Image: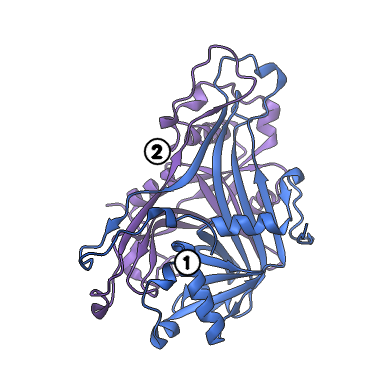
Chain colours: A purple, B blue
Amino acid sequence: METYTPTNRTQVHRLPKRAVYDKAQVHAILDEGRICHVGFVLDGQPFVIPTGYARRGDTLYIHGSAASRMVRESSSGIPISVTVTLLDGFVLARSAFHHSMNYRSVVILGRARLVTDADEKMEALRSFTNHIVDGRWEEVRPPTPSEMKATSVLALALEEVSAKVRTGGPIDDEEDYALPVWAGVVPVRLEAGEPIPDERLAPGVATVDKGRVLSGGS
Amino acid sequence: METYTPTNRTQVHRLPKRAVYDKAQVHAILDEGRICHVGFVLDGQPFVIPTGYARRGDTLYIHGSAASRMVRESSSGIPISVTVTLLDGFVLARSAFHHSMNYRSVVILGRARLVTDADEKMEALRSFTNHIVDGRWEEVRPPTPSEMKATSVLALALEEVSAKVRTGGPIDDEEDYALPVWAGVVPVRLEAGEPIPDERLAPGVATVDKGRVLSGGS
């Protein structure tokens, strides 16, 4: 089993039994998520901004616009934190105190670099697109040079990484098990609804298979 | 319409037409979300940590454990950022470049205070519990004094707040509309599955109505 090595900063102190450093599990969480939260610091103030991303091997690519403050600041090599969280369920206990959530989250620390190599950038954009809909890149018009210029891509190495995972039912205090209160887990997941066609859809175009959305990796 | 006043730090520069400062809309996003991402800085390194929360009026209460680093650091009055993001759909365009996501997100900046008043803390815990399942607090065993002590609650004033919202279909380049590519929106939402009872459920207890999960406010 390949694992990430915990550092002082990624060692999980609180509920260490929930800590995961296994690369395969970390990658699976990143591949299932669709939005990450990027944290960066500006004049001592942290900012946390949601954006799209995709993983390729041991690199996380973060999508931005060349105009956005997040990209401008992050690409200057300042320390950032990127977090991906999947909510899996609500854990209902017999006592208020033992209520919890089942979740899987990954925290990545490091310094981002702006992707300037044209081939690497194109591959990252392909990953973003296919992370939204499996195989989508192969169906759509590829980016023009000016569109490439208008998009910024940040790369963050998956080196200083930790995950936390909670699964299973509630853990109640022994004397509470007799209480006539429903306890257990209400699972939740992100589900795709029926595709809504654009008003100007060309005639005779087959509807996208919604099973290709939320279907997995990048 | 009551609004938050944009500051230098919450003025949305990138795609300003997506900016929302309307309090009612901000509150609705916060009430629909279940997990927030808290950003704080430690030795120059930002950390972004997911946790539960609830809104009461113009205050966001953030759930923590007395033992967690996030709470320890945030409650010392350091600047934090709290972000709540709801993913509403994938926007599929005819070109890779115009792919997007529909989302609603709120970013709150400020300094958190540790809630020490017993009544305020109890009310916050009630809100956390009812934010998971509507009316749950009234059914379960309330916290004991030692459980109260083991839980930390941070309060963050909703003062420096901005939201961003994207809705609607793709905006393609005029010459791309003729392409035989499906375009439109695939909506997504968090859905509750069938409740999974705890193994040690007391006999004769009715299953929780899953409609009470993800059903709204706090």
Q: Position of residue B3 (x, y in %)?
A: 77, 59
The answer to whether B122 appears left or right of A96 in the picture is right
The circle on residue A130 is none
Most foreground residue, B25 or B150: B25
Amino acid type of the residue tagged 1 in the rendering? Asn
Image quadrant where one finds the N terminus of chain B: bottom right
Most foreground residue, B129 or A38: B129
| A185 in relation to A151, above or below | below
Residue A102: quadrant of the picture:
bottom left
Say whether residue A44 is visible.
yes
- Label 2 CA crowd tier, 10 Å (few <14, some 14–19, many 20+): some
| A203 in relation to A167, above or below | above
Amino acid type of the residue tagged 2 in the rendering? Gly
Residue B140: quadrant of the picture:
bottom left
| A154 in relation to B108, above or below | above
Residue A95: quadrant of the picture:
bottom left
Residue drawn at point x = 43 percent, y = 41 percent: A191
Residue drawn at point x = 76 percent, y = 43 percent: B17
Question: In this figure, which residue is indicated by the disc labeled 1?
Answer: B130
Give the label, 2 or 1, closer to the camera.
1
Question: In this figure, which residue is indicated by the disc labeled 2?
Answer: A216
Considering the numbered disc 1 on the image, is that residue within a helix, a strand or a loop?
A: helix
The answer to whether B44 appears left or right of A218 in the picture is right
Q: Are dots 2 and 1 on a single chain?
A: no
Q: Position of residue B131 (x, y in %)?
A: 49, 64
Residue drawn at point x = 51 percent, y = 29 percent: A195
Q: Chain of mark 2?
A: A
